[in-house]
Amino acid sequence: MEFSQEEEHNNISLTKFESMLKTNNVLFFDSNEFENIIHHYLNNGKVALAKKAIKLGLEQHPTSTNLKLFKIEVFVFENELDKANALLDQLHVLEPSNEEIYIQKANILSKEDKHQEAIHVLQKALSLAEETSDLYSLIGMEYLFLDRFDLAKDSFIKCLKADPQDYASLYNIIYCFDFLNETQEAIEFLTIYLDKNPYCEVAWHQLGRQYYEQKDYDKALNAFDFAIISDDTFVGAYLEKGKVLEKQKQYNEAIENYTITLSLDDPTSFALLRIGSCHEKLGNTDLAVQYYYQTVHEDPLLDKGWIAITKFYSKLKNYPKALYYINKAINIDSENVLYWKLYAKINHRLNFLEEAERGHKKAIELGNYELETWLIRADLLKELGEPEAATYNLIQAAEFYPENAEIEFRLAGLYFLLFETEKATYHLKNAMCFDADHIIILEELFPEFYESLLVRSMIKR
């Protein structure tokens, strides 16, 4: 069922088939030609044409198992699993030793979330197959669906043993190691693999990533160098090497590696952002902002780009410019919590208290439940003359942070402002029980309450 390598012959078959469809003349094709035509259409997402080829193919070759398997594949794609199962059962009776029948059965079971049953069927196919690499890969994927990363890893290792150039399996093996937090085991595995395949850039790249995780930056750097020696056009290796050099504060060398990637492929927002960050750390202000501009131009949806350029101007205390860029970011993605937190912080710096409060409120609405966000918003609402809203905000915060003195002292002070002495006393007692040292909150935010007889007597007790 694999697509024929004879490109010229296949192109002739395709041209002939499409000409037949246009003229309604029925031409004869052998079953292999139909298989290659169908495979081509399925690979290119042209399902309607594939279905026409299957129909015509089965009319000319009604006993072809491979054409029926293609029909099953389309049934599965269109979620017509009952039809697929019925046809599979018919084929199984005729050819009980055909591994492809078991593979399609497993595909259906997988689609029905019956992954353990799919594995059982694939293991049956293993006993029938001469080439097992693809089957072990399918079994590995089923184990991934079951979150059995240990067994998935074993299956992908068997794939790699059968075909050492199977980089998809190599990536999957390392993915399993990563998920299992087996960094050292991954290093040992890759080292053994590289002893037999010393010029495998993918393995060197993955080994470098593992050393990076261990913060062994010298070894990571060596691994990425070997990846580049193995393939000097390997963009990923230059990017990772740049990250290591940044960690070692070798910013000029990091810039060199990031810059190489810009000439090897289309510029990536990640590389542009890192170059900008390196220039900023080197004090090259003009170059830094130039690359930050390029970053957001290249990928307007990359939040790290907008955050970098906003923080850049904030550090320079150019808050109006910082506000301009964070507003642009919010216009692109108004659901980004990080944008609203920066928006609030910059407006606070500019003493735009209403906008700062709005920013914190929006951040909370989007799920940012950090204690600091609740507290700052409460303080802003108090400053804006809205003590009732401030108390409501803190009562919500207390649901996430019960028995918190910072919340309770603020509630005590706010209720004092609202002349609700009983509630003020209640929260003051709570606050003193939870952490009396935070009474400085009253002194700073509610000085009149702090000097009152109620608080004085509470402190003495």
Image (cartoon, rainbow, N blue to C red):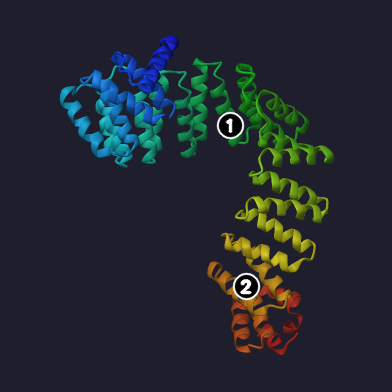
At 66% from the left edge and 71% from the top edge, which residue is drawn? 378
Circle count: 2
Image-based side of 76 in relation to 19, left or right: left
Badge 1: how crowded within 10 Å, few (<14), some, or many (20+)?
many
Evaluate whether residue 148 shows in this view: no
Any mark on residue 444, and which?
A: none
Badge 2: how crowded within 10 Å, few (<14), some, or many (20+)?
many
Any mark on residue 407, and which?
A: 2
At 75% from the left edge and 58% from the top edge, which residue is drawn? 346
Which comes sooner in the sequence, label 1 or label 2?
Answer: 1
Image-based side of 276 in relation to 360, left or right: right
- Expressed as whole percent of the image width and height from the top left, the position of residue 21 reads 36, 22
Q: In which quarter of the image is residue 423?
A: bottom right
- Expressed as whole percent of the image width and height from the top left, the position of residue 178 reads 50, 36
Image-based side of 172 in relation to 350, left or right: left
Q: Which amino acid does label 1 sit on?
A: Arg
How many angstroms separate mark 1 from mark 2 (CA)? Answer: 43 Å
Label 1 secondary element: helix
Front in this rendered view, residue 258 or 403 = 258
**Where, quadrant-wise, is the N terminus in this rendering?**
top left
The residue beneath circle 1 is 209
Q: Which amino acid does label 2 sit on?
A: Ile
- Expressed as whole percent of the image width and height from the top left, the position of residue 394 reads 61, 73
